[in-house]
Image (cartoon, grey):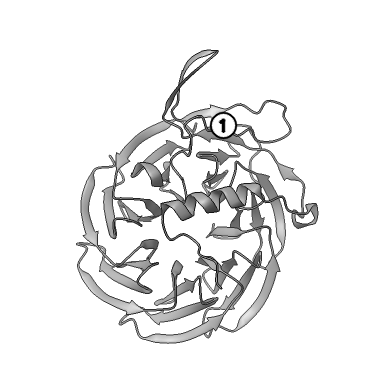
Amino acid sequence: MKRNLFGSGSLLTALALLVVALVPPAALTQTTADTTTEISLDDSTTTGGGGTTTGGIQPVADGDGGGTTTVAPGGPGGGPESLVFDGTYVWVTRQFKNRVVRLLVSDGSFGGSFAVGRSPVALLVAGTNLWVANLEGDTVSKLSLSDGATVATYTVGDGPGGLAYDGANIWVANRNSNNVTKLRASDGAKLGTFAVGRRPVGITTLGGNVFVANNFDDTVVKLRGSDGVKLGTFAVGDGPFGVTSDGTNIWVTNFWSRNLTNLRGTDGVKLGTFAVGYDPAGISFDGSTLWVANSGENTVVRVNTAGGIVHTYKTGKGPFSAVFDGTNIWAANFGSDSVSTSKSVGNNVK
């Protein structure tokens, strides 16, 4: 029986506990991991023997210099699953708070908190707007990047959890209705709904086509962007989760088989499978290399387009996405309600 990845808030919490508990063999981390600074997203107030501490967006001290210290005084926290870089800020989802927050990349300082729909889990920058997939609200929010104001909210399918942009349209992967919705970016008009596989999670575009990772089917479906016609279905690993394009080929994280699959963009031919780490989830491409968040071993790895790991960074608990700002790496830690970054400790990406 296929294991259920991300169906509801309770399942997400259970999965967070699962990935935090996993302790992988050292052999899976192929390079010495650099430490990072962790920024807590907790916004609670707790009272203890040392007095009252007000949470907020603040650095979490690394007590012994040997790794990242995790602090989550607010209980289960906000459930950050996704983050994205807009050129100035890193935006982060707070799934269990129904909000997104932003951090200024120059110093990691708090840049605002903004209400969206129920259970935001995915983010996308398109032009001057931020798009947010609200998993439990069955909606997509469109926000202004300049001030976080809500421009509009659009109804999509059941359980929107993945977003992609083709230059004119927004594509939404609906996890529970097994389809994708195409919205015109300018005004949110619904241009079509197209069936894919079971539990579509990751989605990306390449060469006028759309590629969708079907978590329950262990496949990637290729749709023609102009009309949603299915052009192919390609087998990948166990539990495909994240998907991105390097401009030529498609890369897919396989959560349960702990590896990446590389597919040729033109015809879906499998070009290779590469080990990365325990429970790889989010993946992004920075123009030259790939970044993979290994949620089960609390690392982010940098992977070249030949499939080799070239560097490893420690993170907080359960990182589910990672993004590169041109100098430093940022990761959203679902299990510790935090963001990890290489910036504040001065160890720029290698």
Q: How many marks?
A: 1
* 307, 334: nearer the viewer: 334
* 30, 337: nearer the viewer: 337
For the residue marked with disc 1, what is the amino acid? Answer: Val
Q: Position of residue 124 (x, y in %)?
A: 38, 56
Q: Is residue 148 left or right of residue 19?
A: left
* Residue 40 in the image: above or below residue 182: above
Q: Secondary structure at mark 1?
A: loop
Q: Is residue 294 left or right of residue 7?
A: right
Q: Residue at x 73, y 53 (%)?
A: 24
Q: Position of residue 5 (x, y in %)?
A: 50, 62
Residue 243 visible in image: yes
Q: Residue at x 29, y 60 (%)?
A: 138
Q: Residue at x 54, y 48 (%)?
A: 326
Callout 1: few (<14), some (14-19), or many (20+) C-alpha neighbours within 10 Å? many
Question: Which residue is the site of mark 1?
Answer: 71
Q: Is residue 300 left or right of residue 187?
A: right
Q: Quadrant of residue 345?
A: top right
Residue 321 visible in image: no
* Residue 86 in the image: above or below residue 291: above
Quarter of the image containing the N terminus?
bottom right
* 242, 205: nearer the viewer: 242
Q: Quadrant of residue 307?
A: bottom right
Furthest residue to the right? 27
Q: Position of residue 253 (x, y in %)?
A: 58, 65
* Residue 186 in the image: above or below residue 32: below
